[in-house]
Image (cartoon, helix red, strand yellow):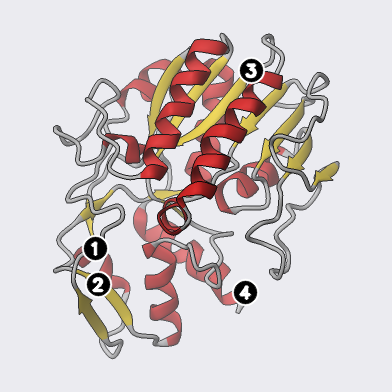
């Protein structure tokens, strides 16, 4: 585990970056930067044990010279990005590029990107050499930021994450993913909405496996490289519905226009070969841990 470092985590009050900040702060001096756009009325979003909280936008002229590592997780997510494309472009592209420019060249940078850049992958599992085909503004802005970072920062590593779930994914957040929506239905009997027939697949990845991958990439990932980070397991929404009690109402609706991907499963051989990392949490165990956490926040 990385220890004794001064680390900046952007977007660190959110789900994934917040969990990264929380775990890294066990052994490091972690500063979180977040503009709190999504979290103003939500309790307990600031990770514990961090040394400092910066409530700033990415373009604010703050000195980054004293950080040993920068983890960039700040983003407008895919759902919000479709309803507010200008905000998506501003945060994920314009502000992000300005932020990258202020990071010293010697400082390692880990950029949390997305497997959405592949669109409907032409091969399943999808590896890093697969052609990219972003199908929405969110995916396009993430891809452009990847390319800019690769061309302008020699110490960067890019992680393309896939359908992360787990503790800190707050059910009251309108932009939460399908997993937390399904599990809140399972816990409290709320109707569950299924787009199409539920045959679409995703690569669900437990958030602590993401944290472990971040450690591995910072320690031994090759600089200037892109890595898929996922479970490597393809799961349909219909299969996921096994976690719903029989008395939960299922509402089938037409396919949605955002993230309308038929199949998703990542090939994770590259990160395994280069770093030795592999996912450790099964879907059953991850779902059980997430449900325990959800019970505690209701």
Between tags 1 and 4, which lies in front? Answer: 1
Q: Quadrant of residue 33?
A: top right
Residue position marked by numbered label 3 in the rendering = 108
Label 1 to label 2: alpha-carbon separation = 8 Å
Of the residues under marks 4 and 2, which one precedes in the sequence? 2
Residue position marked by numbered label 4 in the rendering = 296
Q: Is residue 217 above or below residue 278?
A: above
Judge the density around disc 1: few (<14), some (14-19), many (≥20) Cα neighbours within 10 Å.
some
Q: Is residue 2 visible?
A: yes
Label 3 to label 2: alpha-carbon separation = 41 Å
Residue 79, x across and y down, in percent: 42, 57
Marks 1/2 in contact by CB < 8 Å: the verdict is yes
Determine the secondary structure under disc 3.
loop
Of the residues under marks 1 and 3, which one precedes in the sequence? 3
Residue position marked by numbered label 1 in the rendering = 237
Determine the secondary structure under disc 4.
helix
Marks 3/2 in contact by CB < 8 Å: the verdict is no
* Point 27% across, 65% down: residue: 240
Label 4 to label 2: alpha-carbon separation = 26 Å
* Point 70% across, 19% down: residue: 103
Of the residues under marks 3 and 4, which one precedes in the sequence? 3
Label 1 to label 4: alpha-carbon separation = 25 Å
Of the residues under marks 1 and 2, which one precedes in the sequence? 2
Q: Is residue 106 above or below residue 278?
A: above
Marks 1/3 in contact by CB < 8 Å: the verdict is no
Residue position marked by numbered label 2 in the rendering = 194
């Amino acid at each position: 585990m990385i220890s004794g470092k001064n680390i900046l985590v952007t977007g660190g009050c959110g789900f994934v970056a917040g969990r990264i900040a929380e775990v890294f702060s066990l052994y490091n001096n972690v500063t979180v930067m977040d503009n709190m756009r999504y979290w103003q009325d939500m309790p307990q979003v600031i990770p514990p044990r961090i040394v400092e909280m910066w409530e700033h936008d990415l373009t604010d002229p703050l000195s980054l010279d004293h950080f040993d590592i920068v983890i960039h997780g700040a983003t407008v997510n895919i759902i919000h990005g479709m309803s507010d494309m200008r905000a998506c472009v501003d945060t994920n592209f314009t502000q992000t590029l300005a932020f990258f420019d202020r990071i010293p060249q010697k400082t390692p940078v880990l950029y949390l990107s997305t497997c959405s850049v592949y669109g409907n992958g032409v091969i399943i599992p999808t590896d890093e050499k697969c052609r990219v085909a972003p199908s929405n503004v969110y995916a396009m802005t993430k891809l452009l930021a990847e390319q800019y970072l690769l061309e302008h920062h020699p110490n960067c590593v890019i992680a393309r994450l896939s359908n992360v779930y787990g503790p800190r994914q707050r059910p009251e957040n309108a932009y939460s993913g399908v997993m937390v929506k399904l599990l809140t239905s399972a816990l409290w009997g709320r109707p569950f909405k299924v787009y199409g027939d539920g045959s679409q697949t995703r690569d669900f990845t437990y958030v602590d496996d993401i944290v472990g991958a971040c450690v591995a990439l910072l320690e031994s990932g090759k600089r200037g490289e892109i890595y898929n980070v996922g479970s490597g397991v393809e799961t349909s929404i219909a299969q996921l519905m096994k976690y719903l009690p029989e008395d939960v109402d299922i509402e089938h609706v037409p396919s949605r226009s955002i993230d309308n991907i038929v199949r998703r499963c990542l090939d994770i051989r590259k990160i395994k070969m280069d770093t030795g990392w592999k996912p450790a949490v099964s879907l059953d165990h991850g779902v059980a841990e997430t449900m325990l956490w959800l019970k505690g926040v209701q």
